[in-house]
Image (tube, rainbow, N blue to C red):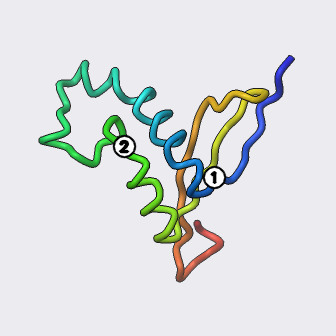
Amino acid sequence: MPRLCFREAAANHAALVARLLRRAFGGQAETLGISKQDHPYFAAFESADWVRRHLADGRHVVLAYLGDQAVGTVRYSLRKERHEEG
């Protein structure tokens, strides 16, 4: 049975992260009528460039793998003034 594990993503994972987000949120955007023109920063319209920019700005991206297959992602940042609160 495949195990779920988490790995820190790097800039070379940007296209994969963007693809996972577009797949996860694309249906929601379609159902709710959310357009890229009206909401360009909605997750359904994520691009590899945005992911790379967020990584360069100090945000962290984690990929979830089930066996060898990437199945999800999460992004977080630590508050500079209170690291323990993240």
Whole-angstrom CA distance, mark 2 to mark 1, is 16 Å
Q: Between 49 and 83, which is closer to the camera in this rendering?
A: 49
Looking at the image, is 45 positioned above or below residue 58? Answer: above
Marking on residue 46:
2
Give the amino acid at mark 1.
Ala
Which residue matches tag 1? 9
Judge left or right: residue 12 versus residue 45.
Answer: right
Q: Is disc 1 surrounded by few (<14), some (14 to 19) or many (20+) residues within 10 Å? A: many
Q: At numbered mark 2, what does the secondary structure look like: helix, strand or loop?
A: loop
- For image coordinates 51% across by 63% down, the residue present is 55
Do residues under tags 2 and 1 come within 8 Å of each other at their CB atoms? Answer: no
Q: Residue furthest front?
A: 12
Relative to 63, is 56 above or below? below
Task: Give the x, y percent position of residue 69.
Answer: 69, 27
Above or below, 86 against 37 in this view is below
Which residue lies at the image location 45% right of the left edge and 54% below the top edge? 51
Q: Quadrant of residue 21?
A: top left
Extreme residue in the right direction: 1
